[in-house]
Amino acid sequence: MGRIKPQTAIFSTGYDPQRSEGAAVPPVFRTSTFIFKTAAEGKRAFEIAYGLDPIKTGESPALIYTRVNNPNCEILEEKITAWDGAEAAALFSSGMGAISSTCLAFLKPGDTLVFADPVYGGTEYLFRHLLPSFKIRTVAFPAGSTQAEMERLLVDDPTVKVIYIESPANPTNIISDVPAARALADKYSTPAKKILVMVDNTFMGPIFSKPLQHGADILLYSATKFFGGHSDVVAGIAMGSKALMGQVKVMRTILGSNSDPDSAWLVHRSLGTLQLRMEKQQESTLRIVDFLRGQPKVTSVAYPGSPSMGDRQVELWRKQCTGTGSVISFCIKGGEAEAFRVLDAIRHIKMAVSLGGIESLIEHPSTMTHSDMTAAEKQHTGITENLIRLSVGLEDVEDLIEDLRQALATI
Ligand SMILES: Cc1ncc(COP(=O)(O)O)c(C=O)c1O
């Protein structure tokens, strides 16, 4: 028998029913602490958890304490690597928990992180305000930059430690060049300092984009989005090699940015339908993109892989993605007032931040998710006052189109 596909692996790996009274699905292990059989078992578990002595092949250390590890979190961590083909994963309390803890695991005062701009507003805040307050320099470059454009940031700066990419970028849907980032990381790494490529794969992954195959070292996800998929849980994921995730998990333990058994259980519940949901949501989104393109009140539609994004974007999409996803950004005629009129007129789509859930959500990035950016930063990155972000869910697509049609008619 050949290697099983991810859609099968998520059902058949990571959980042994015999360890839970034969329960077909994992029970919720709602406990804060775990009982050691012997003191030596406890000692060994701590050596591994604190990175003092790495885990040996085939070793199964005792569980310690839910801030460090918990069966629901570990079961999920094993299953969610199936699509991306990562060696290991770390589950967090939120996408921001994953991003901030992973950055802090590898950056120290004096280091520089360069990032493709824009990124999600919370990440932007971390990069523009919090990391600099710990003397970690952050430098933005435009999402979708060429290798030569990115290289200008690295060539004279030996302090660069991380190249951070969110692809497609929230909210502009710009795809960044992961293989180019890899090539530069390799070129400018030294034996003493390995430059890491981190990719936030929330918008397309893990079904339509697999950046580990294109050279990323670490993937980051807001699992609140497609992984959770039902707008009822907040969680985050980091993925990569066992060695890197070992370092990330130590930071998670110390910062306390771990997930909890109930949240892990909810994300686990959602895994079986992840692929199905993402494919169906994409199918409806393609119809809505077509509709929006024909609307006189819509001045532009940003959607991955579409010719209106420009030849270079289409080429990057072809190389790095196998689908187009279900997040659309579009500009309407007018400014903030007209955008608000559309949002206030929407009846079935819910006006809320977040994305990737089974219900469609619509929001205004400039005043909501990305409101912390300065006017100049928003202008550089194309987060204009007339930009609306739509995440397409599983409602009947005809109803969604009619809802958008009547809302656009108000301007
Ligand atoms: C691309 C992206 N990354 C990270 C995050 C942060 O995730 P969370 O809200 O789960 O902390 C978000 C949230 O919207 C996002 O869109």
Image: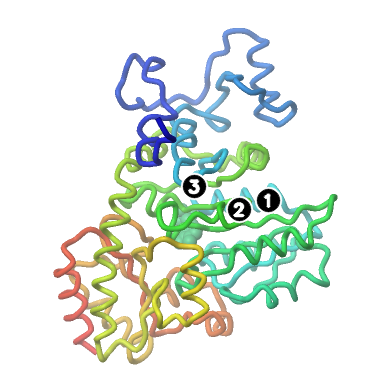
User: Which of the labelled discs sits on residue 84, or is there none?
Assistant: 3
User: Which of the labelled discs sits on residue 408, or is there none?
Assistant: none
Q: Do the residues labelled 2 and 1 touch (CB within 8 Å)?
A: yes
Question: Does residue 175 sit above or below 105 in this rendering?
Answer: below
Question: Does residue 115 sit above or below 331 in this rendering?
Answer: above
State the separation of the CA atoms marked 1 and 3: 23 Å
State the separation of the CA atoms marked 2 and 1: 6 Å
The image's colouring method is rainbow
Rendered location of residue 183, percent (x, y) = 69, 63
Q: Mark 2 against mark 3, which lies toward the viewer?
A: 3
Of helix, strand and loop, which one carries label 1? Answer: helix
- Give the residue pinned by disc 2: 100
Q: Are marks 1 and 3 in contact (CB under 8 Å)?
A: no
Number of marks drawn: 3
Rendered location of residue 244, percent (x, y) = 66, 42
Q: Give the amino acid type for the residue marked by disc 2 in the picture.
A: Ser
- Give the residue pinned by disc 1: 104
Question: The N terminus lies in which quarter of the figure?
Answer: top left
Q: Give the amino acid type for the residue marked by disc 1 in the picture.
A: Leu
For the question of whether residue 132 can be seen, the reply is no
Rendered location of residue 39, percent (x, y) = 66, 10
